[in-house]
Amino acid sequence: MTEPDFLTETRAFYDAIAADYTDRFRDALDATPMDRAVLALFAELVRAERTDAKVAELGCGPGRVTGHLHRLGLDVRGLDLSPRMIELAREAHPEVPFTVGSLLDLPFRDGELTGVVAWYSIIHTPAERLPEVFAEFARVLAPGGHLVLAFQVGDVPLRLERPFDQPVSLDFRRLRPERVEELAREAGVPVTSRTVREPGPEEKVPQAYLLARKPV
Ligand SMILES: C[S@@+](CC[C@H](N)C(=O)[O-])C[C@H]1O[C@@H](n2cnc3c(N)ncnc32)[C@H](O)[C@@H]1O
């Protein structure tokens, strides 16, 4: 079957910028206490559900968030479309398993995971394909399992041209939290908590964090 263009473009974009992205964002969590707080809450919720909870960061890039969750004591693995990102994630976090794969076809069994993290990773999927991504999240989550999402808030996509001077460009889709909530609810993983924070010094738009849980 032929791959949709948006996946080919996303992979090429992140393969091209993987090394620069890794350098730029390696320590970014140190400067974002809200991100750390939401991830800590997620880790606590997941552990309360099952002490041996299995978690995956889907669209993990160079694994900075996956590595953080590992340090918080979770049994976590990472998945990303970009083979170059996965190489760099393995180098930076040799203790964490990483796999190349797609949000649209997750290599996990039904109900295998107690936690799913989608940290700025649903933002390159066209709106009409997002229900399939959420259906995959719902499929791989066990009853009682938790989903956490982070994304930029808005309606107008940002076209990033030649980032880090690399000859690539890609749309970064901003999303309305209400729409993302609807997608989660329709997939069977209703939202339990919503936070929107104002933009930081280097950000142009508010940032949203949603937690959702598959009913027991
Ligand atoms: C903005 S980066 C965020 C990376 C990481 N979560 C972080 O916070 O640093 C988005 C990542 O999602 C991945 N991604 C986007 N669409 C994907 C898809 N359909 N399947 C798998 N990975 C995807 C990209 O390859 C990229 O590494």
Image (spheres, rainbow, N blue to C red):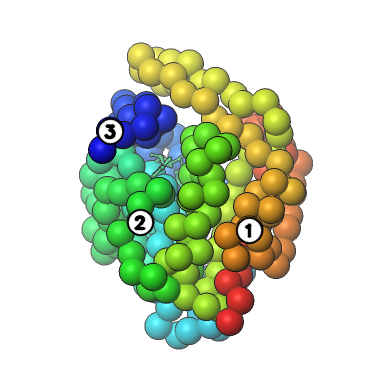
Please name the residue that numbered disc 3 is placed on.
2
Which residue is under mark 1?
186
Would you say residue 176 is visible in this rendering? yes
Where residue 185 sits, quadrant-wise, is bottom right
Residue 17, percent from left and from top: 36, 28
Amino acid of disc 1: Glu
Q: Residue furthest front?
A: 1
Residue 26: x and y, percent?
A: 42, 44
Labels 3, 2: front one: 3
Q: Is residue 34 left or right of residue 65?
A: right
Along the line of sight, the residue nearer the viewer: 93 or 157:
157
Q: Categorize mark 1 by other alpha carbons within 10 Å: few (<14), some (14-19), many (20+).
A: some
Q: CA distance from mark 3 to mark 2?
A: 17 Å
Residue 174 location, quadrant: top right
| Residue type, mark 2 in image | Leu
Indicate the quadrant containing the N terminus: top left, top right, bottom left or bottom right. Answer: top left
Q: Mark 2 vs mark 1: which is more N-terminal?
A: 2
The residue that mark 2 highlights is: 106
Crowd class of label 2 (few under 14; some 14 to 19; many from 20; radius 10 Å): some
